[in-house]
Amino acid sequence: MTGGFAGTGKTLSIEPFFVGEVVLRCYPRAFFSAIVAAALLCACSGQGATPHSTVSSVSPSPAASPSPNSPTPAASATATAKPSPTPAATATATAKPTATPTLTPTPTPTPTTAAVLDDWPLDEHDAARSGVSDETAGTPGPLTLTKLWETNLGDVADTSPVEWNGMLFVTVHAGKSYGIAAASGKVMWTFTTTGNGITTSEPAYDTTANELYAGGVDGKIHRLSPTTGVEDTTHGFPVTITLATATEKDASPLNVANGYVYAQTSGYNGDAPPYVGHVVAISTSTGALHVFNTLCASQTTLINPSTCNQSDSGLWSRAGPVVDPDPAMGGAVFAATGNGLYDPATGDYGDSILDLAPDMSVLQGYYAPSDALQLQQGDLDLGSTSPAPIPRQVTSSTPLMVVQGGKDQILRLVNRASLTGSTPLQTITLDAKVYSAPAVYQIPGGPLYVYVGLPDGMYAYTLTTLGGSSQLTQVWKTTSLTLGSEGTSAAVRAGVVYVAASNELVALNATTGAVLGSAAIGAVHWESPMIARGVVYVTDESHNLTAFQIVPTPSGQSRVRIR
């Protein structure tokens, strides 16, 4: 599924600067495998027109510290927000309606025991796409989701926002990205790409360099100032990631790790050829582009898909490219492909899990189900969801595993340290196709949970290891939640699972599935919640981005419900 063309032009506004942090570095896999093994042993013993883009900014408030479908015409963003601190700014602007405040509470850290707050700079929180916040907040219990503000984006954002240091970033179908004050919902700037298609991509924040990366409908990845939305055209950016914008789509969230920005491409809904799904790694320092084509893989640069004797093998999963969190894997990048020919002898890897070197230079391993041909012929993409890495399991004979769903309604547990052949460690038959991104949550001192959102509810599995053999076992499922038409992805914080259901944001106890709280939202498709600094943010099909503060309910005032 995929593409469009684009245009340029920019104006600016000024926002607060952000504080960086270190990201995962890439090390040789073999070297670190030896280190990890030694550490464990010690432990045991003691195409087309010139692209254009535009930036516009909204007149800001006085300075303060901030505590599939078809294209929908983009409209101006407005917000119903409460008077609360917003990032400082000065503006020159393409006039656009300013957010209109209404009196509602200002976001403050959720009152918790020994609360530790966290940002959410990438899709599913981190480069490994765990879906789990690092916030702590005491013992899970009944809570209230207090609506703080609601901002209408004028278009569908069929994804989640990301957040860093009090600013939210989100991209809508028409290829417009927004910088929004997390405290008030006020639109601080917009950056617009132009083209003929839609995007379901999501920005990525580089916490090391304080840079924001965003896709769009012009077939390019842009580097933006997170405070102003102004495009940085130095260091080789923007970078073209497709030569066929009419048929190839920037479909998935971006990722940042190993000194690269990662993106993947697909076709558009309906799979009109030609397109060749590919994963790209873009150097954050030089803009140098490295490409792995999942068909005609012997060609290692961007290709016109009409020059390949195969088509499809799109990459369109919700989480996009995934970076392995275990040091022994050397920053490996995992991706899953959709319908396409699977024939490694000819360099064709449809319906596969791919293990790629951080710079895309080597295909380090691959896995395809034994019925890959039937998946291709039946439109049952393995790559309807991204691989979900499980943290190292020291008692398992396969300590490094990955969970992979698919449109064939099968959940697979696969050995990612040796990604070869077609035999998984385990398969689980599901009630529906998997489109969501599984969340992987290690309870401190307790079991590891995997949460999978399907249309008929949220499913929870635990991982157990006996005699060196690891297996997933279902431990609960919600019984009266509908998670949109294709299922949505979970976001986990401090023992609570947050999920966007049809017209409802719901908080569930992570170990029991009991409903701890809920709040009204619009209908959802792939829209899923994210959590930053004690606040849940979620988009919906009504073009809204809404913020809810997590407020624990005093003991005795609320009863837990089971669904």
Image: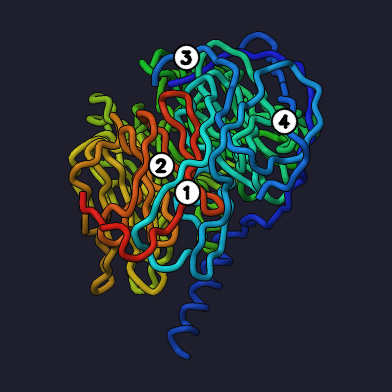
Q: To which residue does mark 2 refer?
A: 386
Does the CB distance between marks 2 and 3 fall below 8 Å?
no
Q: Secondary structure at mark 2?
A: loop
Residue occupying image coordinates x 62% and y 29%: 178
Q: Which mark is residue 229?
A: 4
**The disc labelled 1 sits on which kind of residue?**
Arg
Q: Which mark is residue 71?
A: 3
Q: Nearer the viewer, residue 52 or 166?
A: 166
Q: Is residue 203 visible?
A: no
88 displayed left or right of 146: right
Q: Tell me the distance, in whole angstroms, between the alpha carbons under discs 2 and 1.
A: 9 Å
Q: Tell me the distance, in whole angstroms, between the alpha carbons under discs 1 and 3.
A: 27 Å
**The disc labelled 2 sits on which kind of residue?**
Ser
Q: Nearer the viewer, residue 56 or 90?
A: 90
Q: Bin the neighbour count of mark 3 within 10 Å (Cα to Cα): few under 14, some 14-19, many 20 and up.
A: some
Q: Is residue 80 visible?
A: yes
Q: Quadrant of the N terminus?
A: top left
Residue occupying image coordinates x 31% and y 33%: 502
Q: Quadrant of residue 295?
A: top left
Q: To which residue does mark 1 refer?
A: 129
Which of the two labelled residues, at mark 2 and mark 3, occupies the earlier sequence position? 3
Q: Secondary structure at mark 4?
A: loop
Which of the two labelled residues, at mark 4 and mark 3, occupies the earlier sequence position? 3
**The disc labelled 4 sits on which kind of residue?**
Gly
